[in-house]
Image: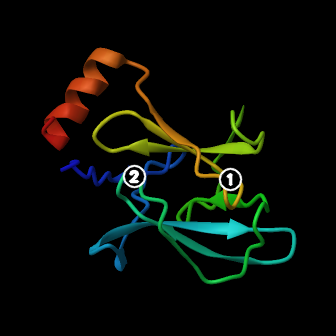
Amino acid sequence: MEKEVSISIKCPLCGKSLMDEGIHLHERPSVKLNIETEHDRGVLWLSCVYGDCTKKLDIEINDGEIVDMFCPHCNKELSIKESCDECGAPLISFVIKAGGIVRICSRKGCNNHHIIFKEIGAELSKFYFEYGF
C-alpha cells in the first residue's frame, strides 16, 4: 500500500499558513487560495495530500483556463516566472512547512506538480523526519 503524504503549506511571501481547518478534503485540512479568472474571483481549496488532485471551488472555471492564485492573507500573487513543462502555463509556488517547495500548474485540467529541495541535505532530512520515510 502506498503511503499518503499530507503536507502543510505556507505562503512563500508572507510565511502564513495556507491550511484551512474549516474545509476538509479526504478528512484532512485543505490548502486555501484566493483565485481570479478573466471573468470571476473566488476561492479554491486543494487537497493537502501530495499527488491527490481533489479540489473544491466556489466559482466555475472552464477546462484549460489559466487561474491566477493569491495568498488569502497577504493577497499577493503566487505565480513564478517558470512555466509548466506539460502545457506552458505559469507555475504556482508554495513552501512546505517541513522543508522544500511545491510547484503546481495554474491551468485547470493540467495536473503537473512537483517538489523541489533547494538545500537538499537540510530540507530533505527535515521532510523525511516529518513524514517518516
Q: Residue at the spot x=43%, y=60% of the render?
A: 18
On the image, the x and y values in percent for residue 49 come to 35, 57
Q: Which residue is mark 2?
A: 9
Secondary structure state at the residue bearing disc 2: strand
Residue at the outermost right position: 38
Residue 121, quarter of picture: top left
Tally of marks: 2
* Up/down of 29 relative to 80, above or below: below
Q: Earlier in the sequence, mark 2 or mark 1?
A: 2
On the image, the x and y values in percent for residue 73 come to 53, 64
* Up/down of 86 relative to 33, above or below: above
Q: Residue at the spot x=73%, y=43% of the render?
A: 90
On the image, the x and y values in percent for residue 102 come to 47, 41
Residue 29, quarter of picture: bottom left
| Residue neighbourhood size for the residue with mark 1, other residues' Cα within 10 Å, grouped as few (<14), some (14–19), many (≥20) | many
Q: CA distance from mark 2 to mark 1?
A: 17 Å
Which residue type carries mark 1? Ser
- On screen, residue 25 versus residue 84, left or right, reads left
Secondary structure state at the residue bearing disc 1: loop
Q: Which mark is residue 125?
A: none
* Up/down of 116 relative to 110, above or below: above
Q: Residue at the spot x=28%, y=40% of the render?
A: 98
- On screen, residue 40 versus residue 17, left or right, reads right
Q: Nearer the viewer, residue 73 or 126?
A: 126
- On screen, residue 113 versus residue 35, left or right, reads left
Q: Nearer the viewer, residue 33 or 88?
A: 88
Q: Which residue is mark 1?
A: 106
Q: Residue at the spot x=66%, y=59% of the render?
A: 69
Which residue type carries mark 2? Ile
